Amino acid sequence: MARDRTPNTRAPIRFASALTFETDARMAALELGARIKRALEGDRVDLALVFATSHYAEEAHALLDRVRDALSPAVLVGCSGEGVIGPEREVEGEQAVAVVAGHLPDVELRSFNLVPAEILQAAESPLELEKVIHTPKDTRAFILLGDPFSAQVDGLLRAFNIVHPGVPVIGGMASGARTPGEMALFCGDHTFRQGAVGVGMAGSIDVNVIVSQGCRPVGPLFAVTAAEANVIAELEGKPPLEQLQAVVAELSEDDRALLRNGLFVGRAIDSSKEMLGRGDFLVRGVVGVDRGTGSMAIGDFVDQGEIVQFHLRDAVTAAEDLEMLLSPQSFFGRPSGALLFSCNGRGTRLYDHPNGDISAVNAFFAGMPVAGFFCAGEIGPIGSRNFLHGHTAVLALIRPGSPRDRD
């Protein structure tokens, strides 16, 4: 099912964001609505993204109705999360709602919801995707939010990569529930407990996406010389465990200590590229090692012939990585608004202080309207393809753009 909003040309792109700790759904919506409307100075709300902590699970639909009444948005999507992110604060362990809303003239918005059967169909036959989302060919970006229990998002993202090549898909998987049916996905005036929801944005809008995987490579590059499915049998003709032991022997004591945080393998997005560094790898966790054969299983499929490199992760590296990716964005001016999707393994579980990711964002763009949530899997592009990640921070920076000619 898809819904749309046709563009208007009354004013430039504007965003506003707000965070409330009000536990009553009606009062929370009134507070958010007042703040958003005041910041937009009466401009129509074309798009609203609503992120509510799982404390609202039982009254999720009541909250949705109240927010819709308060904002009257043309298009609304959102979901529940273990924690939410507001303009200046990351909320963990407390009840809260975060909203970012935009007035988007000359931008066509098309929201959609996908039931699990439609997601599976798109994964198996990618061209079926357009039959259910009906988005324009000049779509600049998609926001996608899914239920981790019922949405086969890896396959869905492959369909997006085929049908809309090079178009970023950003978002994350709802979090904060242990059993199926407890997550809430918002789309229009409906609350869904499975599947996925999203919105496509076309027209005069630019969306720059940062995917901070918070890792740094260690040791040399290796060619995969034998692999099956997600198991690497050989790196440069030797068992991966043997190659890893050689890498560890050369690490500093501090870096060896980081192995307690887990070991990761980066898959080169383009193995033909001569120089590979941060940002050139899709990082996946090592999920098992066979000490008998020395083979290594990772959280992704691996192809023989591709280039990989071991990676380490810690709070310092995560902060440095996000700052390094943010730095060049300052040359393009302050964005109109932003969305931040952080792994629920980040926050105070990663940093030794609160507000780790949002503080880095605000250091570059103070006062920028932004909201998001802590995800059970983050969605964003590496290179020209979209992937489902873990332990990442995905930041979408939204600016006015020039309309493209339509086919």
Image (spheres, rainbow, N blue to C red):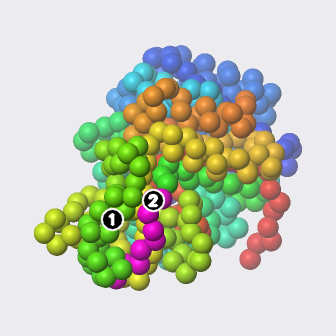
The residue at the point 78 percent across, 42 percent down is 334
Question: Which labelled disc corresponds to residue 277?
Answer: none
Q: Nearer the viewer, residue 18 or 268?
A: 268
On the image, numbered disc 1 is attached to which residue? 246
Q: Could you tell me how far apart the alpha carbons at marks 1 and 2 are, in whole angstroms? A: 11 Å
- 135 relative to 398 in the view: left or right: left
Mark 1 or mark 2: whose residue is earlier in sequence: 2
Residue 56: quarter of image: top left
Image position of 324 with respect to 370: above or below: below
Q: Quadrant of residue 156?
A: bottom left
Q: How many marks?
A: 2
SS at mark 1 in the image: helix
Query: What percent of the width, then of the height, locates residue 242?
Result: 27, 69
Type of the residue with mark 1: Ala
Can you say whether 269 is above or below 373 in the image? below
According to the picture, the residue beneath numbered tag 2 turns out to be 218
User: Which image quarter is the C terminus in?
Assistant: bottom right
The magenta span reads 217-225
Compare residues 226 and 299 and report the one nearer the observer.
Answer: 226
- Give the percent coordinates (x, y) of residue 366: 73, 31
